[in-house]
Image: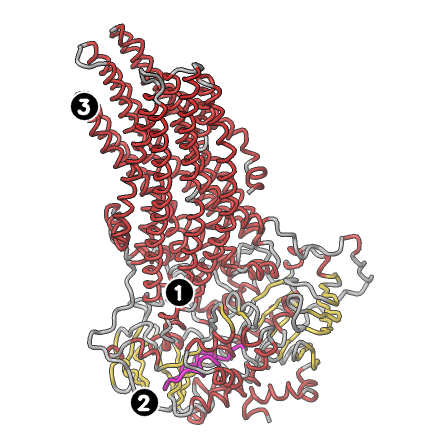
Amino acid sequence: MKKVLTYYLRPYYARMALGFAIKFFGTIMDLFLPWILAFIIDSVIPTGDKRMIYLYGLLMIVCAIGAFTMNVVANRMASAVSRDTTRTIRHDLFERIVHLSAAQTDEVTKPSLISRLTTDTYNINNMLGRVQRLGVRAPILTIGGILITLTLDPVLTLILVATLPFITWITVHISKVSIPLYHHVQDASDKLVRLVREDAAGIRVIKALSKTDVERARFDDVSREVIRNEKKASGMMARVGPLTGLILNSAQVAVIVAGAARVAMGACEVGRILAFMTYFTIILNAVVNISKMFVVFSRAAASADRVMAIIDMPQDMTQALPACVREALPQGEEPPAIAFEHVTFRYGKSGEETLTDIDFTLRRGQTLGILGETGSGKSTLIRLLMRFYDPDAGTVRLFGQDVRTMDNAALRAHFGVTFQSDTLFEDTIAENIRLGRALTDEQVMQAARDAQAYSFVVGDKQGFESALNVRGNNLSGGQKQRVMIARALCGHPDILVLDDASSALDYRTDAALRAALREGYADTTKVLVAQRISSVAHADLILVLSGGRVIARGTHETLLKTCELYQELYASQMGGLAQ
Amino acid sequence: MNKSNNTSGAQSARKPRNAKGTILRLFQTMLHERALFVLALGLTLAGNLLGLVGPSLAGEAIDAIGAPGGIAWNVIARKCALMLACYAGSALLSYLLSLLMIHISRGVVYRMREQAFDRLMRLPVGFYDRNPSGDIISRISYDVDTVNTSLSNDIVQILSTVVTVVGSLGFMVAISPKLLLVFCVTVPLSFYAARRRATVTKPLFRARSRKLGELNSLVEEQLSGLTTLRAYCREDATIDKFDAINEEAVEAYYRSEYEGSVVGPLVNFINNLSLALVSVFGALLFCAGQMTIGSISSFILYSRKFSGPINEAANVFAELQSALAAAERVFALIDEPIEPEDAPDARALTQVEGHVELDHVTFGYEENQPILRDFCVDAKPGRLIAVVGPTGAGKTTLISLLMRFYDAQQGCIRVDGSDVHGLTRDSLRAAYAMVLQDTWLFHGTVYENLAYGNDRATREQVVAAAKAAHADSFIRRLPQGYDTLLTDDGANISKGQKQLLTIARAMLLDSRMVILDEATSNVDTRVEKLIQKAMRRLMAGKTCFVIAHRLSTIESADEILVVNHGEIVEHGTHQELMEKQGFYYNMYRAQFE
């Protein structure tokens, strides 16, 4: 919360001050009205001077117009400040999220990131606007009221002032207690987000298994949890208003008693006490209003904590080695495009090693095939290559350079990639292939041709401008994969990575894709993860992974002779034709 | 494939929007807590009454100070004690009232969420293809929250406004009916002004809710594809995209506040105006000798009491508006047309034999674009039917029809001789065990995910199924074995492993028919072969539909349907089709090229 106030609001301090000033004068005008009124009753009416009555009536209307205009202007300025602040906070948060490392994203989880970006920033927006709009009048009334009562009877005012520390303490204390409670509320609503997101993705399975009732029950649990936490937090905050009211009202009683004593001593008159009470009521209402604002404030403070926790996350996986330490490239000879040097890696701090001692090199234009059992670490190897994670031991090099010394953008600019579980966006097909890169229509179409997507794309009325549904759901599995492969091919990357990207393609399409790769992408270094031997048979180097280790390496021919697992795989896929 | 059509899916079925209707529905939802609501009303009345008694006691106490016979200490003591009691009572009442309102509004929120989610579970699957889950999430979380905040705070405000206004009005009538004429002008003016404002702000508040939904959708989509975006260095482009929609969202919020925050000062202005008028007319009445100064001042006192709460109510006006706009979006979701109900005479499918027939079935997601044309299949009980063909041929659509996610436009599908329209969906779906290419796991332990389809399965059965699916060994290597929590759609295991888990889940189902749609596409072929043996055992005697690109996996099928462009172009056993040297033969040869 502190950061919101001292950092994000700082650029607007001047505007806020101006807004407060305008609001201040608007409020004064507003408060002026009853004063004029009192003057009319006390001094003008008895004279019976109609001209004066009209004059003062006119003055009241002028004041009313002034109050209206200034309040509206100040409100609008306040809204503008909260708009600009929220815009910046949201932008910073999103920017930070996009640049979080994969490990950090795993840790916070996406549903939580989503709700921080939306509900939490919304809470902040709401609070900023409200506090600025309503947070001026009440303090003015309180302070102004106290000043006036001071002129009426300083001793009685002391009683009033004496309550303020208590009220402050109660408000601050309860607000402190509720902020963690609001944290729980937001955490529970993360779960709500997760469940709805999950079920939207899995609706077919849920319906197929007739599990809608189970999901209702799961939702009910989460929904109840949100409500329970909300009730706790709001119930805590609900104490503020009545408690402050009670303290002030008790003080009022004390004032009457003390006032009576002072009248008895002759230090005060009854009329003053009467006036004192009127202002007391004004102050009381103002203080209760301030305490109400703490509800909004506490909720927003919890949200701000959640947002800032992400924004302030340390930069993970920075360029570990400064540029000056970068090894000089050997003269003359071109370094290998990809080199893994005794790379070992595990997810998280503990647990089994996912990859152990991976060591290989690949020259520019060569093809690497990676085969292996389910869960043997194939996709992890890709993640290390593209530096989504850093190895625990060993080095990954790209064109001779340790990937940790490279700028992430420079590193990834070498790649065209299709992941195993890749995504299509709710956009046109062309834009899904282009993905915002500076690529010509020509290049997009060529990539689609090579990825065997061209015919079905132009088969549709709108061709490349056809809009895809959510997650590309209006395409078949194979069509989706071809659009994603086109995305990877587009712009002829230095290194092409296809992680089991053709699993939904029929063999004929797969073969055509391979032919296109061979002919059109000779200079591209290719890394192909596949289940089908036919997809990697032509590779210059094939790695067979098992349990995170390379258990065999070589070309198709050598592996057929030397590797038992490879032989088994081959036999299982070639059916009767293997012999 | 028109974008505007896609995104407007949620709005398409929306009833004409109407604020009164929305208020009425909100009110109906609240009526579930009728007794509590009446209690809240009572508490408000009592609280306000005590609030009025307090000051009058104070007045009496002060009178006692200035009493002609010196200070009446005993009176003061009595009045002060009474005051303390009054204030303590009113503090207690207002605390209780807050708790009560929190309870009521949370009840409403709970019910709205329940209804919305219930509807989500009953919507046809196509809804989820058209509507971004971000927008759905936004409705269930943000929009419901907005309603909640408004209900718990603003209702009390409005109730006490009503109470005070009616009370003060009574007093004012008693003092001077003539002066009250001023209010006959200004009160309707206030209402008129608020209404006018409402017509200006209503679309703005709608836009604000909608834009937040759009922001949510974008965030959800972009974060889902974050790895891809990072891989292509699209971080900055994504941020630009986000900034654009963020700009729209904060601007929509600002626009609504820009207009909405006028209401408070406006109503205040009208009240001030009436004050000025009252003063002038009061003064004139005095000059005409029709009124005393004393009564003018008490009239004004009450008129201040009268306008105070109206001002307060005007200040919550903006929130009420945004709550209504949010409620509209939630109700629109609740009103989405559900999957057609089962026919009234639909019977549950029991004692399934597993005889599935497709009789000249034609279907397309859009009327005039058939995906499947004149499809005829006769799957006798216990047969293994393989469906092969180029991508986009309509294979997955066939599965959707079998599961009745969609209904055929022409022709009919029969199970055990009865038209599926005459069967309940639940029983029909329960008769199938289905494994899809897109694996789906939820946030829960491995064990919970496996046992999801069959809650009667014992631990032994679950482990046995995992073993059969060759998932047991990797599950045991996970940090907590079967009790490992799968987070974020199983981000901590590989895609092939997810497929093994979903296969194990299907193996636990006791159903007579099996659908495998590319169920093992990301599993290595050796494990696939091993699983197949286990599957064969499980599939023994069951009717199976298998879609696969690896033709080696379906060579032993009883019948292979070769589908191209939505039509069956060839069918027969592997042997027959190979001999035919047609479409299938060419596809088969392509594997070895």
How crowded is the residue under tag 1: few (<14 C-alpha within 10 Å), some, or many (20+)? Answer: few
Q: Are marks 1 and 2 on the same chain?
A: no
Could you tell me residue A288's position as x and y percent? 41, 35
Q: Secondary structure at mark 1?
A: loop
Residue A145, image quadrant: top left
Looking at the image, is mark 3 or mark 1 nearer the viewer? 3
Whether the magenta-drawn stretch holds residue B519 is answered as: yes
Q: Work out how far the residue at label 3 is from the one at label 1, CA to CA, in angstroms.
A: 71 Å
Amino acid, disc 3: Leu
Give whichever of A275, B537 is nearer the camera: A275
- Looking at the rendered structure, the kind of residue marked 1 is Asp
Compare residues A253 and A408 and report the one nearer the observer.
A253
Q: Residue at x 56, y 73 (%)?
A: A500
Q: What amino acid is labelled 2 in the image? A: Glu
**Is residue A478 in view from this perspective?**
no
Whichever of callouts 3 and 2 sits on the residue coming sooner in the sequence is 3
Q: What's the chain of the residue with tag 3?
A: B
Range of residues picked out in magenta: B503-522
Q: In this figure, which residue is indicated by the disc labeled 3?
A: B181
Residue matched to label 1:
A460
Q: Percent x, y for residue A512? A: 53, 75
Mark 2: secondary structure: loop
For the residue pair B80 and A124, the one nearer the viewer reads as: B80
Q: Kindly identify which chain the residue marked by label 2 belongs to.
A: B
The disc placed on residue B353 is 2
